[in-house]
Amino acid sequence: MKRIFITFMVIIAIFTYSPAFAETLTIALFDLSGSVLTDNTGNDSKESPYSRNMAELKYEINKLKRADMIIVIGFGRKSNVTLLKASMPKQAGPMNRNLIATREVAVRKLDENIASKVKLVDSSKTDIIGSLFRASRLISEATLPESTERKLLIYSDMLDNENIGLSFNKLKNNKVSLQSKAGVPDLRGVEVNIYSAFSDIKGMSTVQTEAAIKNLKAFWTDYFLKSGSVVKLYRTSY
């Protein structure tokens, strides 16, 4: 009976997300564009950026603490879907059982929504900047105590070709400056963590690849500085 009650409370926590109180509010932006869905052989494998990003996201969900909240937004071109809204219990329970069970249900719900909602996203291009503006709105509209930490996690190759035409070929020779009428979103006081996984870059030497990655990181570091946020982590893997 006790186990049934715990399961019921876990399901309630997943489906009744309410930003009235939280130790930490996390917004996770998850790239569903075609450029991250396959590995460098064109296959959807464990080595694809998508698979690596998903493993990192699930790792973060399993690190959530009591009273933490998370919203996961999947994005592509001018479109996005909510992949998860979940609140961790305020009481972790004996040996953290309530907390652990809620994390497990959140991961399963994420998998279910990925399976049913990915097809709703236009994967032809990547609209990172549009998604950042949406994340800014979600954070600003959340009614939370001032003490609540606000985090933004981004799982993407960070090549925004919907708004500013970022590509490795463009970046291998030149630094790119922001030229957008939209400006930058307000992310003041938000901790940003970027997981920028991408496949091997065909037709580019190692030197050109490293130059492109350096210029890409420089662009986004400057972008988030202008937004008022703090980039705590910017990790690349390929």
Image (cartoon, rainbow, N blue to C red):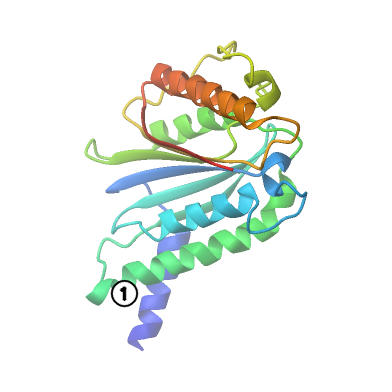
The image quadrant of residue 141 is top left
Residue 43 locus on image (x, y percent): 76, 54
The residue that disc 1 covers is: 97
141 or 180: nearer the viewer: 180
How many numbered discs, if any?
1
Name the amino acid, label 1. Arg
Q: Residue at x 67, y 33 (%)?
A: 126
Residue 96 locus on image (x, y percent): 27, 71
Q: Is residue 203 visible?
A: yes
11 or 49: nearer the viewer: 49
Could you tell me which quadrant the N terminus lies in?
Answer: bottom left
Could you tell me which quadrant the C terminus lies in?
Answer: top right
Residue 229 locus on image (x, y percent): 36, 26
159 or 82: nearer the viewer: 159
The image quadrant of residue 150 is top left
Q: Residue at x 23, y 35 (%)?
A: 146
The image quadrant of residue 100 is bottom left
Q: Residues within 10 Å of mark 1 (few under 14, many from 20)?
A: few
Q: Residue at x 26, y 67 (%)?
A: 92
Q: Secondary structure at mark 1?
A: helix
Residue 140 locus on image (x, y percent): 39, 31
Q: Residue at x 29, y 40 (%)?
A: 149
In this image, 44 relative to 149: left or right?
Answer: right
Above or below for 202 versus 41: above
Above or below for 182 versus 103: above
In this image, 148 relative to 179: left or right?
Answer: left
Q: Is residue 21 visible?
A: no
